[in-house]
Amino acid sequence: MSAKTNKADKLQSTVIIAGRFTERRAQLTTQPVEESAAEPLEPGSMVGRYLTLSRIGVGGMGIVYRAHDTELNRTVALKVLPPKLKKYPEYLKRFHTEAQAQARLNSPHVVTLYELMDHPVGQVLVLEYVEGETLESRLRHYGPLSVPEAMRVFEQAMRGVEHIHRMGVVHRDLKPSNIFITRDGEIKLMDFGIARLMDNHDPSQNGAMVGTLLYISPEQINGRETDCRSDVYTLGISLFEAVTGRLPFERRTDYGLMHAHVQENPPSPKEFQRRLPRELVSVILKAIAKDPNRRFQSVTEFRTALQELGLVERRQSADAGIISGTHHKHRSTENSSHRIWGGVWMDFSMVSAVFLLALILGFFPVHLGPSRNPSDEAMHTQAVKWKKASPANKPTESRETKAYTPQRVIERKDKYETLRQAWGG
């Protein structure tokens, strides 16, 4: 009787999910703005005191440009919501919510908002401009990260998310394309287009399914009120992808993805990357638990669990040596070379003393004549030829090297490119 009841409950949940999706599909706001709805600015156009230089890309809530601040002489990013979209209250409201959320934040791991302006070209957010690439781009071109590198990236990202949550903001879209890696290796979080202000009790913030279907949490799919644990889920999905090179749920339809996030148990990351530590696998699976009460209850708990693996702290020590400056690095290298050569000289002196003592005592015969006879020379030559011809001595390519060859990366890109574009990944 209980088995039939559980089956009926699952079927009912599936019907509810499908119905909610049909009603709210138009409210999924992470899809890029259509080009027809936006009029791109030409390079050289002036937006207030900002001179547009080039278009960076099209986001879920507008077009992003690189521009020059003519008064402060610095490069900035302009995020423009075109006038044609201002007539839609949902777009305009979310754009203002994004500005309000980002205005609260002041962290080295969050892209800084400088200004919100109303201009004839549309609503404009003036943002910090950073150079580098997104985590999504890094994974697409180079495949999964090593465990130490993933720990370094997510440790910084989680520090940024901790600050976001302390300031009363839930991001709700912490996917790899919103985790930016600067050229200096610093992590910046960006795109607060669907962020939720926890102290804003506007009913319109609840009841709508918002997020990217590849990473969205079950409670976001069901339209329930979201909190910090929704960001824990999305970060867990992103970490799963970072260390394995693929997502836990990849389906061909929207409904298939939603059903997987709500009903299906995720596969173990070890199925796709055998060398992952079991402790890391347990942490990831806990972060993406279906029930928010079974997840880490905060990003701080999530980050602490990763630190307890002993991987984050070791990487931080290595980064500290790099960040401290070139002079310190040269000095440490010089000291290391002194220690190495000093140790070699001591070892050489000891070996020389032992060898001389052995000669004096007659343990080793000394040959002052010809080194070897012709027959020995011929045997030595044959042995060398045989070794060169042996295939066993040829360098072999390790499995780990093969996993990162350009061909494998191209295959992965071809396989998932269409899927990511379809669901705003």
Image (cartoon, rainbow, N blue to C red):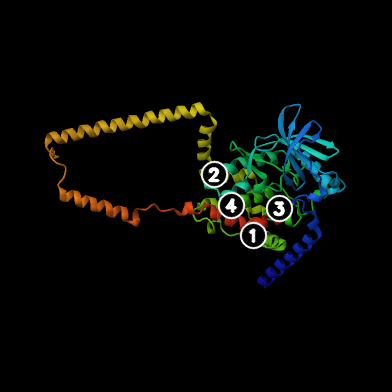
Q: Residue 67 location, x and y as percent? A: 74, 35
Question: What SS does tag 4 mark?
Answer: helix
The answer to the question of whether label 2 and label 4 lie on touching residues, with beta carbons closer than 8 A, is: no
* Residue at image mark 4: 284
* Residue at image mark 3: 424
Say the numbered circle drawn on residue 211.
none
Q: Distance of mark 2 from mark 4, alpha carbons?
A: 16 Å
Q: Residue 274 location, x and y as percent? A: 50, 56
What's under tag 3, amino acid-wise?
Gly
**Which circle, 2 or 3, is nearer the viewer?**
3
**Which circle, 4 or 3, is nearer the viewer?**
3
Say the numbered circle drawn on residue 250.
1
Q: Nearer the viewer, residue 108 or 399?
A: 399
Task: Work out whether 114 lies above or below 245.
Answer: above
Task: Sort mark 2 into few (<14), some (14-19) or many (20+) by Cα contacts within 10 Å.
Answer: some
Q: Residue 266 location, x and y as percent? A: 61, 59
Decide if residue 230 is on the left or right side of residue 124: left
What's under tag 1, amino acid-wise?
Glu
Q: Earlier in the sequence, mark 1 or mark 2?
A: 2
Say the numbered circle drawn on residue 149.
2
Q: Earlier in the sequence, mark 3 or mark 1?
A: 1
Question: What SS does tag 1 mark?
Answer: loop
Q: Distance of mark 3 from mark 1, alpha carbons?
A: 13 Å
Q: Distance of mark 2 from mark 3, alpha carbons?
A: 25 Å
**Which circle, 2 or 4, is nearer the viewer?**
2
Question: What SS does tag 2 mark?
Answer: helix
